[in-house]
Amino acid sequence: MTKFHFNGFNKPTTMTFNTLRKWMHWGAWLTMAASLPITLPTHAAEPFPSKPIQLVIPFAPGDTDNMIRPFADRLGEFLGQPVVLSFKPGAGGAIGASTVATSKPDGLTLVGTSPGSIVVVPLANKDVKYSLDSFEPIASLSEGGMMLVVAKNAPWKNLKELVEYSKANPGTINYTTSGAMGITHLLAEIFSKEAGIKWTHIPEKGSGPAVTSLLGGHVQLSSAAVGAVQTHVESGALRPLAVFSLQRLKSLPDVPTLRELGYKIAGPAYYGISAPKGTPKEVIDQIYLATQKAIEKYNSQISGNLKLFGAEIKHLNPAEYKQYLKDQNALFADAMKGIN
């Protein structure tokens, strides 16, 4: 048998041909293995959502939640996790909205949005640490109208008569809203400026007190959310003069829009959901798709729930909802100029 002698070690090594062949055989395998890519075990990212989604409502129960709950209660079916409403009222919506604005942008913490909480509040209060740009709009879900309304025994049968009286008697009409620098206040100011009239604002702390003040005859007019006065309009206790919507509301088909009456002002109130800035697009799209599926499957039930509050479905995709909010931001920023 042939033997090989190597002197490259401290001690001479004698190796048979078969041993050398085995070494060469394993060497070839090792060389080939070294040339192959090494794949280490990896952990796949957790699918979204990995746990229940918290939907923050920045107002007390009985307001924005009425416009969003009919959708939220059904989103879990299409997301695989429940959507839980969490109420964080205060500071006109600023407390709840700021909580979401500073949350981790993973889609697990959302905010129920309206022009009031993420548009008007940061415009009116410079101490608020967020702005419209702090959020990623996901979807508009519903429209809850705003309107001008008077008591049933008011001498004005329509808006034209009220405007004529206001021009002849500037400052004598007292009107109430749910609060200073809120949506209803700003819309009334925009309208009165366009109409060339002067009203005296009497702000209240909420929709309930504002409606009570009107019903009690303490003021002559109210700029209010339809949901706050719906039952009184239906009973005949209050008389609607006009709505700020772009089109007549299904719940009040006989009430004209201000645009129908020749004015430019329109302030449709769309309620929806938004996420913190930086939330991945795929997460935004997934939540939006879930809202779409919920509306398709439960349209009649959702519509029935909203009708109780004078509202209706208004579904906009992320880009459309973002544009709407930007338009509202421009509208209210301009309205605040010169308002004390």
Image (cartoon, rainbow, N blue to C red):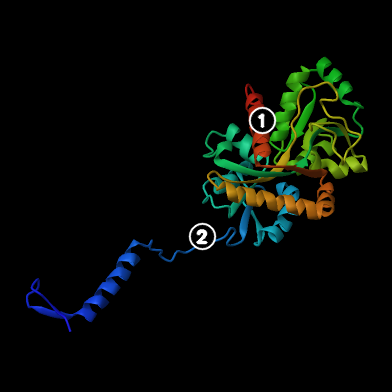
Percent across and percent down for residue 95 are 58, 46
Tell me, for residue 338, which label it has, or none.
none
* Quadrant in which the C terminus appears: top right
Nearer to me, 78 or 236: 78
Q: Look at the picture and state if 84 lies above or below 164.
A: below
* Camera sees residue 99: yes
Percent across and percent down for residue 55 are 64, 53
Nearer to me, 330 or 20: 20
Residue at 87% x, 45% y is 231
Percent across and percent down for residue 97 are 59, 45
* Quadrant in which the N terminus appears: bottom left
Tell me, for residue 45, which label it has, or none.
2
Picture quadrant of residue 175? top right
Picture quadrant of residue 170? top right
Outermost residue toward the front in this view: 1
CA neighbours of label 1 inside 10 A, class few (<14), some (14 to 19), many (20+): some
Q: Looking at the image, tell me whether mark 2 or mark 1 is earlier in sequence order.
A: 2
- Secondary structure of the residue carrying tag 2 is loop
CA neighbours of label 2 inside 10 A, class few (<14), some (14 to 19), many (20+): few
Q: Look at the picture and state if 108 lies above or below 311.
A: below
Q: Give the spatial CA distance, label 2 vs label 1.
A: 37 Å
Type of amino acid at the residue the image marks with label 1: Asp
Nearer to me, 145 or 197: 145
In this figure, what is the number of numbered marks?
Answer: 2
Type of amino acid at the residue the image marks with label 2: Ala
Residue at 83% x, 54% y is 301
Tell me, for residue 327, which label it has, or none.
1
Percent across and percent down for residue 90 are 61, 46
